[in-house]
């Protein structure tokens, strides 16, 4: 079992850019476990994984390959109770450290400052306050982060690289499941008995904050249920 080997050590931006470019080419056809192993070995405690806990596949995989890795969860205050249950189940059963990162403002404080139901009027601004700023704050502790994006989720994710450099953040972004399909996810869940958000079985192909998520219909893009009233498919976390 691989353990984190590298000391916490901030890396130069040009070094990160070069590492990401080399790894992106070398790991394009690699199994997800190998991609995670590379990131955990290269960055040690300055590598984390993010999860929205629609399922715990990536977190489970990381816990096998690199136990002890930090898991960042953006606790917007507007999640379904089922999502929080999956988070708590993972925190209590897998060898990872789950960090719940909250926005600067509670939902009530945001309502007071911006008016109620900002998500129904200005979802980009709401996501910026409740997701993007907390992520930026959390990522200040890391040089590299992983997320569970897959190319088959939507046309906007079809070009997702397995490893790349995010110039705007100065971070290495790792997408170990980029080449996986929904069937690969199902197989992994069955094989390892991975916790899955019960909302998936109730027709929510993608799970986010409750005000901005609806069930999807057969044949719809998995992310069609996110921000259904707006021309918006991403929260701004993935660039
Ligand atoms: S997903 Fe909706 S409720 Fe959640 S932060 Fe974005 S706009 Fe706000």
Image (cartoon, rainbow, N blue to C red):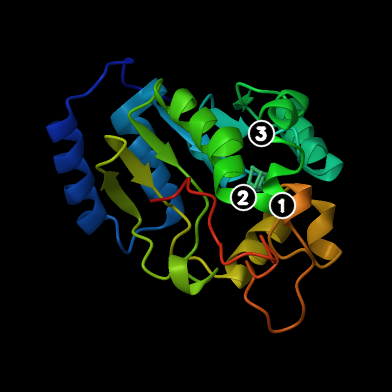
Q: For marks 3 and 2, give the one nearer the viewer.
A: 3
Q: Earlier in the sequence, mark 3 or mark 2?
A: 3
Q: Earlier in the sequence, mark 1 or mark 3?
A: 3
The percent position of residue 10, horizontal first and vertical second, equals: 26, 19
| Residue 217 found in image quarter | bottom right
Give the residue at mark 2: 123
Frontmost residue, 165 versus 137:
137
Is label 3 in contact with label 2 (beta carbons under 8 Å)?
Answer: no
Q: CA distance from mark 1 to mark 2?
A: 6 Å
The percent position of residue 213, horizontal first and vertical second, equals: 74, 58
Q: For marks 1 and 3, give the one nearer the viewer.
A: 3
Give the residue at mark 1: 120
Label 3 crowd (10 A; few <14 / some 14-19 / many >=20): few
Label 2 crowd (10 A; few <14 / some 14-19 / many >=20): some
- Tell me: residue 73, above or below residue 204: above
- Tell me: residue 138, above or below residue 177: above
Q: Give the left or right position of residue 80, taking residue 192 as reference.
A: right
Q: Give the left or right position of residue 43, taking residue 185 as reference.
A: left
Which residue is located at x 35 percent, y 34 percent?
144
Element under label 3? helix
Frontmost residue, 154 versus 90:
154
Q: CA distance from mark 1 to mark 3?
A: 12 Å
The percent position of residue 202, horizontal first and vertical second, equals: 86, 64
Element under label 1? helix
Which residue is located at x 67 percent, y 79 percent?
220
Is label 1 in contact with label 2 (beta carbons under 8 Å)?
Answer: yes
Frontmost residue, 39 versus 67:
39
Frontmost residue, 106 versus 10:
106
Give the residue at mark 3: 114
């Amino acid at each position: 079992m691989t353990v984190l080997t590298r000391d916490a050590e901030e890396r130069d931006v040009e070094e990160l850019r070069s590492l990401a470019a080399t790894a992106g080419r070398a790991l394009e056809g690699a199994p997800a476990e190998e991609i995670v192993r590379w990131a955990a070995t290269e960055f040690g405690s300055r590598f984390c994984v993010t999860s929205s806990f629609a399922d715990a596949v990536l977190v489970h995989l990381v816990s096998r390959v690199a136990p002890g890795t930090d898991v960042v969860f953006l606790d917007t205050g507007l999640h379904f109770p089922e999502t929080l249950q999956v988070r708590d189940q993972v925190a209590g059963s897998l060898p990872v450290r789950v960090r719940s990162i909250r926005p600067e403002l509670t939902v009530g404080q945001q309502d007071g400052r911006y008016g109620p139901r900002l998500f129904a009027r200005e979802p980009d601004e709401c996501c910026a306050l409740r997701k993007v700023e907390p992520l930026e704050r959390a990522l200040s502790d890391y040089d590299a982060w992983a997320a569970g994006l897959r190319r088959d989720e939507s046309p906007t994710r079809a070009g997702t690289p397995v490893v790349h450099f995010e110039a705007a953040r100065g971070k290495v972004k790792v997408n170990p499941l980029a080449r996986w399909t929904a069937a690969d996810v199902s197989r992994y869940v069955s094989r390892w008995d991975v916790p899955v958000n019960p909302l998936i079985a109730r027709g929510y192909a993608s799970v986010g904050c409750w005000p901005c998520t609806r069930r999807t219909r057969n044949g719809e893009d998995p992310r069609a249920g996110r921000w259904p009233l707006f021309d918006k498919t991403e929260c701004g976390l993935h660039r």
